[in-house]
Amino acid sequence: MSDIIIIGGGPAGVSAAVYALRSGASVTIVKKDGGALEKADLIENYYGFAEPVSGPELLEKGIAQAERLGAEIVDGEAVGMGFTDRLQVMTTAGDFEAYAVVLATGSTRNAPRIPGLKEFEGKGVSYCAVCDGFFCRGKDVAVLGSGKYALHEAMELQPVAASVTLLTNGETPETDIPDWLRVDTRKIASIEGGMLIEKVTFADGESMDTFRLFVAVGTAGSADLARKAGAVIDGTKITVDAAMATNVPGLFAAGDCTGGLAQVAKAVHEGAVAGMSAGKYVRSINN
């Protein structure tokens, strides 16, 4: 078990790892990809590069630096969080525990433009099975998504719901589907109801009643994971203090997921603060 788990291998995550490692903590970085930086062609506004550098090149150098300092790199997708006496991170590469976690996977919330989806947020449309599954006891519910994150949310709901249906919205499922999970691949036309969600209507005109719809499209972002651990969220931004700490002891966040300027320089700064703060937190509970 590492002292600190960092979710995200971009500038914020790697910067947090570098500073946490230098504080004497052991660190594991869980990363799926390089996020927005991986798609950047050329970067010419970051300190220290006389010539433009590509996003993939900057990512590669950052990971190499973290590895040289002793970080363990795990290629996997984070799909859930929880805590007992330690923070727990559930990933496609296995489950991990640590004294502290730094969230640094960016700010995206994947939600398709389906009429009614936004209107029913908080009225039957949810983004967290761990948070709201309790209210679905004995009810028929649905999960919107087609990947491993969607499957994880369905598995959270299966013990309490009467039935769970995976709605892929025209996509082919990206993972193996267990026998108990219903799958409907039809394109969704709208989400409908009165005061609360009542049904999902498909493009072919047919409808399916549902008590609640859980959105889990693509991968879990930092805000999704923070919400599962009980952290305060402001829209899609994680609320942190000057030390990049959330309201959950041992849980920190850095980079685009905290809002503000979406730039490498800001991500590196916040990662450094979060890494040092996480290292200080680990020392405080072990002394």
Image: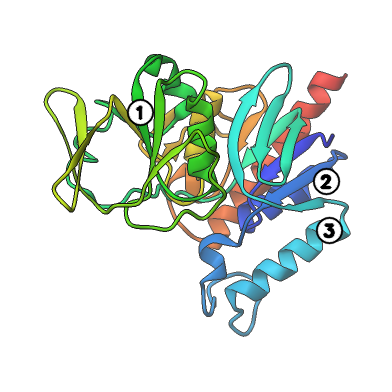
Q: Return the disc, 1 or 2, that comes first in the chain's sequence.
A: 2
Please state which amino acid type lies under the numbered disc 1: Val
Task: Please tell me the numbered disc located at residue 21.
Answer: 2
Kind of element beneath mark 1: strand
Kind of element beneath mark 3: helix
Residue 209 lies, in percent from the top left, at 23, 30
Residue 203 lies, in percent from the top left, at 18, 53
Kind of element beneath mark 2: helix
> Which dot, 1 or 3, sits closer to the camera?
1
Residue 263 lies, in percent from the top left, at 50, 60
The residue shown at (46%, 22%) is: 131
Could you tell me how far apart the alpha carbons at marks 1 and 3 are, in whole angstroms?
A: 43 Å
Nearer to me, 123 or 177: 177
Q: Is residue 182 above or below residue 19?
A: above
Q: Which residue is mark 3?
A: 67
Q: Which residue is mark 1?
A: 141
